Image: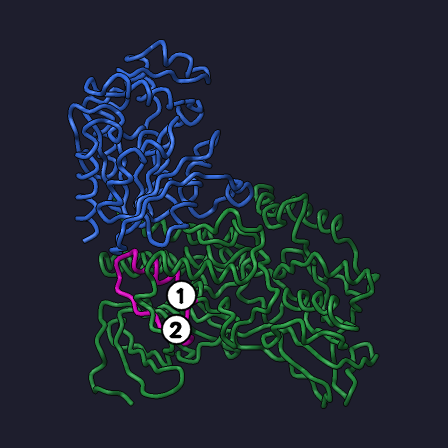
Amino acid sequence: MSDLLRFTDWTRPVPPADREVVTLLPDDDEGHPPVLFVPGMGHGAWAFAEQWLGHTAGRGYPAHALTPRSGGDLRSQVHDVIQVAASLPRQTVLVGHGVGALVVARALGRYPARAAVLVSPVLDGWAALGAALRVNPAGAVPALFGGRLRLNARQLFSPEMPADRAQEYLARIDARPRRRDLIARTPPPRPVGRPPTLVVGSPDDRVVRRKALDRAAAEYGGAPLLFPGMGHYLMLEDGWTEPIDAILDWLGKQLS
Amino acid sequence: MQDSPDPGDRRDAVCVVGAGASGLTAVKNLLEMGFLVDCYERETSVGGAWNWRHDRSPVFASTHLITSRPLTEFPDFPMPDTWPDYPHHSQVLDYLERYAKHFRLGEQIWYGMEVVSAVPAADGFWDVTIQSTGGGSSRVQRYAAIVVANGHNWSPLKPEIPGEFRGQVMHAGAYKDPAKLRGRKVLVVGGGNTGCDIAVEAAQQASQVWHSTRRGYWYAPKYLLGRPADQVYSWSRRLPARLREWLHRRLLRLHTGDLTRFGVPAPDHRPSEAHPVVTSQLPYYLGHGKITAVPDVTRFDGAAVELADGSRIEPDLVITATGYTPRFDFLEPALLDSDEDGRPDLHLHAFARRHPTLAVIGLLQPDAGLFPLAHWQSVAVARWLRLRLTDPARATAIQQKESTRPLASWSRRRVVPTRRHWFEVDHVDYLRSLESLLRQMEPAK
């Protein structure tokens, strides 16, 4: 597909939609770029609002988290991310989690982000589906036929996660993968404006395997930053401070 | 006064002339490619033509875009999707201001400064003389390259009409406010987009309106089939050229139809052979008798205006919407290979043929929005300047190959022979040519 000739966008622009954006601003504007968190499949801005958003604002970055429109395909999710990023006063840092990282990877081809972080990225739907089938076949098979992807706590969280919290989160996660997006294997576009890009994950993640992390990082010319012992949702686990601090440290270095 | 005998040295930096839409995207893309940039803007804020706060801006109170949002916005910085299909000019200015702020372009822009001359120095460098707009002292700086984005809609092209006229004559560029028209008898000269928009506005305000056009145009509506018309045309690009041409005619026939019974001349060209004129309301007001179509103006005679068919009308106010002319006063015409009429001859209307470090951004009349084209031109110029530094041999090879590219592949040659059509381009063909140039300059992976 051509970068310059965008017939689909010219003739069938993505219609506007309500987008929920949760924002936490630092007390003083230190001139840092805004950070926009993009959640993955089946969860919303709340997953970041739990811990990461406040922590990011506490370290001086305007922090925003977006809940993508409900029922939107990959194209409209990418559109939503770029719309929000472009509405912020400065060039934005995009942080995507899970399938949200896939959305960010696509958005990078259209919007020159200040920097990008892909957290536990699901860039390859097939690999993720394979992992899900292996760990929780009963939950994954219906998704093959367009149904709901049922997830269990063992699959998403580390054993350290208290059972009641795990259940509470699970109840809020409603993953309905769109089959077309899941199995589309178009490689992510080359990012415009050459933003520094970091891949973060856990070798013990049962959704995104170590190999997939390595592949994703190699795609952006690096090695993944790993947090052993954690599950898929780095921002919900007990050890959530470690990855976000590492991300913001990395970001600080890129900006200086 | 030059304050030092040695030119101020900005050896690694690129000079950008103008901070309108084209200048801003040039600055952004040069920065992105790692260049230092100094941008000079003679007004006190960004926006160029869209900056209605200054006199040279051609916009008037009711100006709206004539191309729809998706075909007008910068490809990497969309307009808000809640905006209307055809935003108002003040929204466009707001958009450009946000673009400048978002990418921190303001830090590279010198306001109230005018480039008065640019002279090539050795090795592709340029000595650029800068002066504050109000006159005063000037200084000379040396730059690695110069990117000209001074716009082409600010220097009015006024028709030479013989005779004396007792009423008021103004160029469309000076027209701002419909209050000027209220209750008066108005003659609008010119069948382009501005002329039609002002004629329509006059129909709503003035007591009598004549609209004089030299030739017949295809008046395209703003909407077709419930979609912005440019989006429908864009969709039709998938069709083979002849079928597309047929479909355009068919749609225009169906929608606008034959206007000759209102005294409008029939078009003497195909729909694709002239800059598109987009007006949904002109036929409406012709049909309501609010606008009278008249032929070309031949002569002023006291209170009267004489027309090509010999008839005479007596307007109070004549507005000439006869366009603008591109001007590059600070450059020797030979640098741009300009002809005697001042029309530059540039590769892709952007790259100077004999000066690899001189480029012009936004000197195009596309059949879609200009911003995306200016964006991709800037990307190409920035990549080209970078390649010259990193891989001169490859840069030379590309230049040689590009110079053999036939004109017809990127420039619309089949247009009606009028002065204003020489830099007309078909945006799809043009973007294709730019894309092939960009591919050649792709960094080796």
Q: Residue A70 location, x and y as percent? A: 47, 31
**What residue range appears in magenta?**
B23-46
Instruction: Judge the density around disc 1: few (<14), some (14-19), many (≥20) Cα neighbours within 10 Å.
Output: many
Instruction: Judge the density around disc 2: few (<14), some (14-19), many (≥20) Cα neighbours within 10 Å.
Output: many
What is the letter of the blue chain? Answer: A
Q: Residue A89 location, x and y as percent? A: 36, 54
Q: Quadrant of residue B424?
A: bottom right
Q: Quadrant of residue B403?
A: bottom left
Left or right: B158 with respect to A231?
A: right
What is the chain identity of the residue bearing mark 2? B
Q: Residue A256 location, x and y as percent? A: 18, 53
Q: Residue A141 location, x and y as percent? A: 39, 12
- Residue at far top of view: A138
Q: Is residue A61 magenta?
A: no
Colour given to chain B in the rendered image: green
Res B23 label? 1
Q: Is residue B34 magenta?
A: yes
Residues tagged 1 and 2 counted as in contact (Cβ below 8 A): yes
Q: Residue at x 20, y 27 (%)?
A: A238
Give the residue at mark 2.
B41
Q: Amino acid at mark 2?
A: Glu
Q: Amino acid at mark 1?
A: Gly
Left or right: B445 with respect to A4?
A: left
Q: Secondary structure at mark 2?
A: strand
In the picture shown, does residue A91 fall above or below B188?
A: above
Q: Residue at x 38, y 71 (%)?
A: B17
Whole-angstrom CA distance, mark 1 to mark 2, is 9 Å
